[in-house]
């Protein structure tokens, strides 16, 4: 991967807007001929400005970064020379950071009132490493945000809105930087040098082998994206699949692909929420959906699995997670994935324990997601001119930050990627070892 070096040389055209004006960032689709961030605040920074910035860095664990204010003042609490720095162009942005560092750093970068020098991935990784050393719960207002969680129940209508916000912005956009099958979840790299295409196929085989798919079996998939896994299961493992999704753009693509592959009789793509799954299946599979379910709905998800997965059937849930319960950063939940929650393993148990599911296997493939995101970011930058033909510069910067910060989060261990295999009841027919998962072979059913 070619690292994203300094993006400080972004177009610096002047604007007639006030230097203190910042509007919330949305995923805009209109084009603008030239990106015009507000001009810098004129005049010197005050002692209070510099003290506030230094205090924020201390609260964030003294990360190995520098912050350059609009007058050139350099603020750092690092104890060694640093290679990454943020440039804050106006006082308004600085003061907003006090109230919500995550949200207003993201918005500031998207709008051009914050620039990053030395690499977005590297800057975010330094911040993650700093905050990992301290308890930032109070600083990031996690307790307050948790207390308001009841106001944000992830109802079916809310889920539709949230999914539309991120996934229904055009298949053409995702085709620019995902793999050929449009798999928008963590790939699996048996060899770190594998191509993204090979690693996504390896991920699908890894999932299929973990749940022990057999020809003629049945699978229900909750949240199927553009249909890559459902089609792979039917084509290479001979199973019948019902895949549920509430993104119309994704479903239209998936159905057309199944038609082209001649798999309409084996794969049914259903436009409906996971809560409405009906029927009885040998396996329940969900890859990359749990993040959108909402913590308050975990027990309901367990009840859905219990009623639809046959006794002794193996299921798998693949999800981004974290090492201890926490609230996902506010910029991601407001601008990228509304309503998202990434669970700790203890929170995962809210799905399994009430139904007395037997957890068979837990695997953390965090570094595989870091590598996946490196590929996505590299492809995004390689195709940036085509992205610019579709969207404005604010959108481009928002997605650049999202992908870069995600690489950093998985590299630093701020985020994890869990695959949890379970059975509905005691299954004594499971493999005795993991050996079958790692034997080199073509896609297809295996013993066990």
Image (spheres, helix red, strand yellow):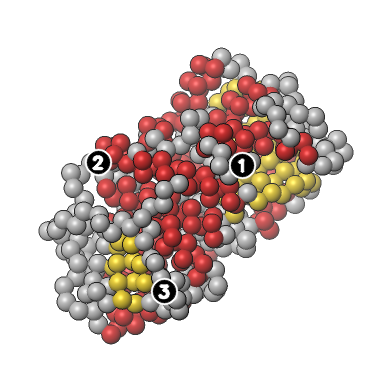
Nearer the N terminus, badge 2 or badge 3? 2
- Place residue 429 in its image quadrant: top right
Distance, label 1 to label 3, CA atoms, is 34 Å
Distance, label 2 to label 1, CA atoms, is 41 Å
Nearer the N terminus, badge 2 or badge 1? 2
Q: Residue at x 56, y 42 (%)?
A: 193
Which numbered circle lies on residue 81? 3
Image quadrant containing the C terminus: top right
Q: Residue at x 48, y 53 (%)?
A: 406
Nearer the N terminus, badge 1 or badge 3? 3
Bin the neighbour count of mark 1 within 10 Å (Cα to Cα): few under 14, some 14-19, many 20 and up. Answer: few
Instruction: Tell me whether the residue at label 1 lies in contact with that at label 3, contact meaning CB atoms closer than 8 angstroms.
Output: no
Distance, label 2 to label 3, CA atoms, is 41 Å
Bin the neighbour count of mark 3 within 10 Å (Cα to Cα): few under 14, some 14-19, many 20 and up. Answer: few
**Residue at which label 1 appears:** 191
Instruction: Tell me whether the residue at label 2 lies in contact with that at label 3, contact meaning CB atoms closer than 8 angstroms.
Output: no
């Amino acid at each position: 991967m070619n690292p994203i070096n300094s993006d400080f040389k972004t177009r610096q055209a002047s604007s007639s807007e006030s230097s203190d004006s910042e509007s919330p960032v949305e995923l805009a689709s209109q084009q603008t001929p030239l990106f015009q961030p507000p001009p810098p605040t004129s005049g010197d920074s005050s002692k209070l400005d510099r003290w506030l910035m230094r205090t924020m860095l201390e609260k964030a664990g003294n990360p190995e970064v520098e912050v350059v204010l609009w007058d050139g003042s350099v603020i750092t609490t690092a104890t060694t020379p640093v290679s990454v720095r943020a440039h804050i162009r106006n006082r308004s942005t600085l003061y907003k950071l006090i109230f919500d560092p995550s949200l207003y750093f993201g918005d500031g970068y998207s709008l051009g009132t914050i620039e990053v020098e030395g690499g977005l991935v590297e800057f975010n990784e330094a911040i993650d490493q700093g905050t990992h050393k301290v308890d930032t719960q109070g600083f990031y207002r996690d307790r307050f945000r948790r207390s308001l969680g009841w106001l944000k129940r992830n109802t079916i209508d809310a889920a539709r809105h949230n999914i539309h916000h991120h996934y229904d912005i055009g298949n053409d956009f995702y085709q620019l930087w995902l793999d050929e099958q449009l798999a928008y979840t963590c790939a699996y790299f048996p060899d770190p040098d594998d191509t993204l295409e090979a690693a996504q196929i390896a991920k699908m085989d890894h999932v299929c082998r973990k749940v022990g798919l057999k020809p003629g079996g049945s699978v229900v998939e909750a949240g199927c994206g553009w249909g890559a896994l459902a089609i792979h299961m039917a084509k290479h493992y001979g199973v019948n699949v019902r895949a549920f999704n509430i993104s119309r753009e994704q479903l239209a693509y998936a159905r057309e692909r199944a038609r082209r592959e001649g798999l309409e009789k084996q794969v049914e793509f259903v436009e409906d929420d996971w809560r409405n799954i009906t029927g009885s299946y040998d396996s329940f599979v969900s890859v990359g959906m749990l993040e959108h379910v909402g913590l308050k709905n975990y027990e309901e998800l367990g009840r859905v699995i219990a009623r639809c997965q046959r006794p002794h059937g193996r299921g798998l849930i693949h999800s981004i997670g974290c090492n201890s319960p926490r609230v996902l950063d506010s910029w991601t939940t407001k601008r990228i994935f509304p309503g998202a929650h990434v669970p700790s393993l203890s929170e995962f148990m809210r799905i399994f324990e009430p139904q007395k599911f037997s957890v068979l296997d837990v695997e953390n493939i965090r570094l595989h997601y870091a590598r996946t995101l490196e590929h996505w970011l590299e492809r995004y930058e390689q195709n940036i001119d085509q992205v610019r033909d579709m969207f404005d510069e604010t959108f481009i910067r928002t997605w650049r930050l999202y992908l870069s910060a995600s690489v950093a989060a998985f590299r630093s261990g701020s985020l994890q990627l869990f695959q949890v295999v379970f059975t509905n009841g005691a299954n004594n027919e499971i493999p005795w070892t993991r050996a079958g998962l790692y034997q080199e072979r073509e896609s297809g059913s295996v013993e066990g």
